[in-house]
Amino acid sequence: LCYECGQFHLLLDNHLYNFQDEVDDELICHICLQPLLQPMDTPCGHTYCFKCLENFMQEYSFCPMDRKKLSFQQCHKSSLLVRNLLDKLVVLCPFKAECQQIMQRCELEAHLQNRCPGFKKYKSELQRKKNPISKGKEDPPAKVETNTSKDPEAPSGGSSLVAESSAAAVVSLGTAEPGLVNPAFEEAEEDLPHRTSLVAETTTIEIHREDPEEELGMRIVGGKDTPLGNIVVQEVLRDSVIAADGRIAPGDHILEVNGVNISSVTHCQAVSFLRHPGPVLHLMVLQEKGFSNKTAQQDSTCATNREVIHVTLIKRDRSEPLGIKLIRKTDEAGIFILDLLEGGLAAKNGKLSRNDRVLSINGQDLRQGTPEAAAQIIQSTEAGVNFVILRQPGVQLSEPVEDGSTSNNSSSSSSSNGGSPVHHRRRLDQNHYRRKSTYQKGYVSHEKTVAIKKEPKESLGITIGGGRDNKNKLPIYVTSVQPIGCLFRDGRIKRGDVLLSINGIDLTHLNYYEAVSALKSNAASHSVVLKALEIISPNSTEPSPDMKEQGFSWSPLWTTWLGLPSYLHCCQDIVLTKGNLESWGFSIVGGFEESKGNQPFFIKTIVPGTPAFRDRRLKCGDEIVAVNGVPAIGMSNSELIPMLKEQRNRVTLTVVSWPGSLV
């Protein structure tokens, strides 16, 4: 229960209020459809709740009302007049059984703390329920964290890995693990002089959080209940804790969390471990380094002298140059600093040096990147530019590659000094279509029709997410059912339900703003008929991590999307090209097996420095639906792999991409 508004809601969600009168539409947030809280104005003249706009801008880069380009930094607090008008809205005390007081919204918190008999009764009952028995009912993640090192029977979902994390272990992935199909790793005889093995490295990373409940800011896929098996990082969000640290990248496998082995736990359990609050988080990760023709001993020897350094440069505006020249080297992948222009921002800062290797910028992994990609990230950033660089004393730069894509002269397209970078990445193929086949192993989809009679002014009381303009082309789904509308009273529409239609209007093809408009216009009628889809997980008896971790904003788990019927899927064609001696650069799992039946093919690994990595559209956890137009459903590994190997220089992959679970 929130002690400020007296109602139940997630810690990061807006407060809820029971308003005495209908609130003027001009004071309504068009994201949550509730009266504004901490109102924020956009440059295009619209106003939204602070939290609503902040959450929306994490997924989109435009204004929800007019779809004009927008960033959160451009918005500002509404005027004092507007904030005072909102604070003076009249609300009812939420404890209406014991208290019938009405007051201004800004007075409710003081009323609850000092005068409300209902709130006082609630706190007294809560105090009586606290007894020694409750101490034995802690959340599993808390017990694991405090007991793992001492108690071998702690419920970790598997035995703890040996504590060799202080020294990185270099392993070869030249042979595939059982059940793993590796077109990326299979080498033809002519390839052998060019690469000897695929090298990966396990290392322990310590993450520090000023706020123990702050999200790490990464999306994960996998789990023992999915074909992927391991827990894999799908995406690192910009400006997050993980991005600021700079050492974890998409494709990394998470093996341990605070000493607990999570390599054999379900997806839901892994999310719980990673969401567990704390100021320090110890992660053991497996990071693939790509194909190498150097020995592991050589790599580990030179690594001992290197230092990882974090540098932040603050731009006064987006167009301000940093004064850095970046190049590629002939004998080593990645980007290096060639020069710092005198009088430039980087030179004045003094923390970057010539010969530094750029590992990441603003959380974007550039270990196998290009100077053009780095320049694009820098020039699109409005304020702080966060560098993670690798420095090895005494190393001199080799001659830069003169391949037309980079140059070391003053007019280089890779310079962050104001020139527009050359874009070599192919444009996103916008040909999205629905596939006919599906995979729903273990999931039950239940379509339901909910008819409700309501007052014309009564709100539906739901918030939504998704939309076909979302980068993952998601259907519209319910993010919360608030206890102030007719749907909460009815009880049949639940958080996570996918909305199919309202009063006969199809919602499955709409973008976010179109769906909000459709819901709002139909909510004004006396009766509403909603069609929705409820997806029930095979692990429905397992407590959901979002119920235990109240500090996290809610979004569906990755495994929930796997149960979505195929008619709601949006597929994308991705065309990859490669040279004759290259691998495609990804590994896959899944396919038909006698013991397991039909399973989807998932991307498990994307190898640094390969065509799949450079393209940047494929992500770990993506499902391969077809290869060159031939459906993959029902195929076994032995059928799909020859199709991939036959394509010498070009292949078209049709994929479905779902967002990983946010931790």
Image: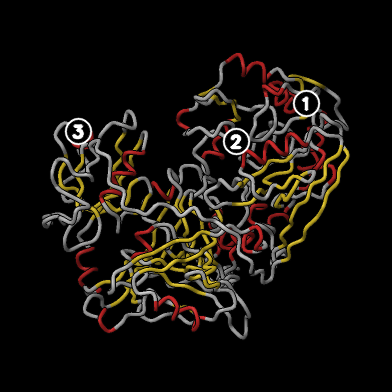
Residue at mark 2: 52
The N terminus lies in quadrant? top right
Tell me, yes or no, whether the two marked residues, 1 and 3, touch with CB atoms within 8 Å.
no
Instruction: Give the alpha-carbon distance from disc 1 to disc 2, as whole Å.
Output: 19 Å
Mark 1 or mark 3: whose residue is earlier in sequence: 1
Mark 2 or mark 3: whose residue is earlier in sequence: 2
**Residue 226's x, y, as percent?**
58, 70
Q: Residue 432 or 339: which is nearer the viewer?
A: 432
Say if residue 112 shows up in the picture: yes
**Residues packed near mark 2 inside 10 Å, few (<14), some (14 to 19) or many (20 plus):** many
Amino acid type at circle 3 is Gly
Instruction: Give the alpha-carbon distance from disc 2 to disc 3, as whole Å.
Output: 38 Å
**Residue 65's x, y, as percent?**
59, 31
Query: So how many labels did they put on this image?
Result: 3
Amino acid type at circle 2 is Cys
Q: Is residue 349 left or right of residue 7?
A: left
Residue at position x 49%, y 38% in the image: 61
Question: In what element is the residue under mark 2?
Answer: helix
Amino acid type at circle 1 is Phe
Residue at mark 1: 19
Q: Is residue 429 left or right of residue 579?
A: right
Tell me, yes or no, whether the two marked residues, 2 and 3, touch with CB atoms within 8 Å.
no
**Residues packed near mark 1 inside 10 Å, few (<14), some (14 to 19) or many (20 plus):** some
Mark 1 or mark 2: whose residue is earlier in sequence: 1
From the image, state whether disc 1 or disc 2 is nearer to you. 2
Residue at position x 67%, y 20% in the image: 86
Say if residue 166 shows up in the picture: no
**Residue 656's x, y, as percent?**
54, 61
Residue at mark 3: 344
Instruction: Give the alpha-carbon distance from disc 1 to disc 3, as whole Å.
Output: 55 Å
Question: In what element is the residue under mark 3?
Answer: loop
Question: In what element is the residue under mark 1?
Answer: strand
